[in-house]
Amino acid sequence: MISGKTKKGPLAGIALASAGYACFALQDAVVKWLVADYEVPEILFLRSLVIVIVAGIFVRRYRHPSIFKSPYRKTVVLRAALMLLAWLLFYNAAKHLGLAELTTLYFSAPIMVMPLSILVLHEKIGISRWVACAGGFVGVLVAVNPTHSPNLIPAAMCIVAGFCWAWSTILIRLVSRSESTLTQMFATSLLFGLACAVSFPWIWKTPDAAGWAMMLGLGLVSALGQFLLYEGYRYAPASALAPVEYTGLVWAFIYGYLIWAEIPAVNVFAGALLIIVSSIILIIWERRGHLAARSKASH
């Protein structure tokens, strides 16, 4: 079943991952709204709880084998720990850094995916993927327009968060070789939520009706984003999807305008254009490569 899906090629993975990053940008907007009244571990716990319930229902319905009996179970635990660390570092760094510095530093993650995909997954990376990823990063730099040097410790926290996220995306590709998307979602969110629950005696605040509604919506959007992204990494190599992550910045601008009526400056539009062009270049190159491979296989 998995091998059959993989034959669809990287274009399906790119499309799925792009939709997933759009969901994650909306997730970040909701978290930005909630973090003013609630602590991050509480928000992440309730988000994870919704994902566990949704994924658990489908895992039971389709009788997926338990991922905790998988040869990759230790990898799943490692990925959950990396994601938790990334979230905590990122949102704590956000208290001390401006949006420009924060975004620039965090979007170093797709660059880190490239060498990690070589070292961990032994993928071969063509020049088109390096060019697309570099073009996307330049677009981020233009869009956020950093004007001064960030504080050292928060900057280091944000870079480490980016590295943790990059490593976790590599692990998705690794585990997807044998495990279903739904079982990965269930196991990762379960471990993630349990870790967050440890802090409840010190940080818990019972949400009001609006808080419950937003956290429920957050969990549903996150579940959809995870499913789309996990499926994307099943279809396409991690290095091919790394530049696509930059589309999340474009979605962040769109959500910022729709929710807070924020109008981006000229440099933001210029950076977004570079990001879009880089992703289009990647899609064109991947399509050519996929068609060439199919043509060669048919002969």
Image (tube, rainbow, N blue to C red):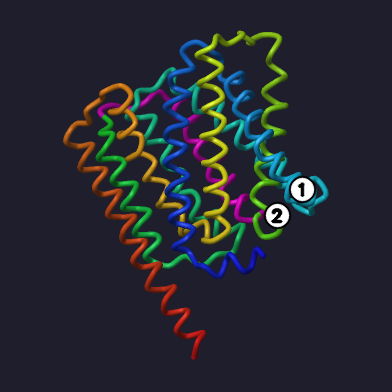
Magenta range is 147-175
- The disc, 2 or 1, on the residue closer to the chain's N-terminal end is 1
Give the vertical position of 145 relative to 295 (above or below): above
Please report contact status of discs 2 and 1: CB closer than 8 Å, yes or no.
Answer: yes
Disc 1 marks a residue whose amino acid type is: Ile
Q: Say above or below: 21 vs 213.
A: below
Main SS type for the magenta part?
Answer: helix
Specify the amino acid type for callout 2: Glu
- Residue at 45% x, 25% y is 30
**72 or 93: nearer the eye?**
72
**Which residue is at the far front?**
61
Residue 67 disc label: 1
Q: Quadrant of the N terminus?
A: bottom right
Residue identified by numbered label 2: 179
Question: Measured from the top left, where is residue 157 in percent x and y?
Answer: 50, 29
Residue 180 in the image, given as x and y percentages of width and height: 68, 53
Q: Residue furthest right?
A: 69
Q: Is residue 239 left or right of residue 283?
A: right
Q: Residue furthest bottom?
A: 299
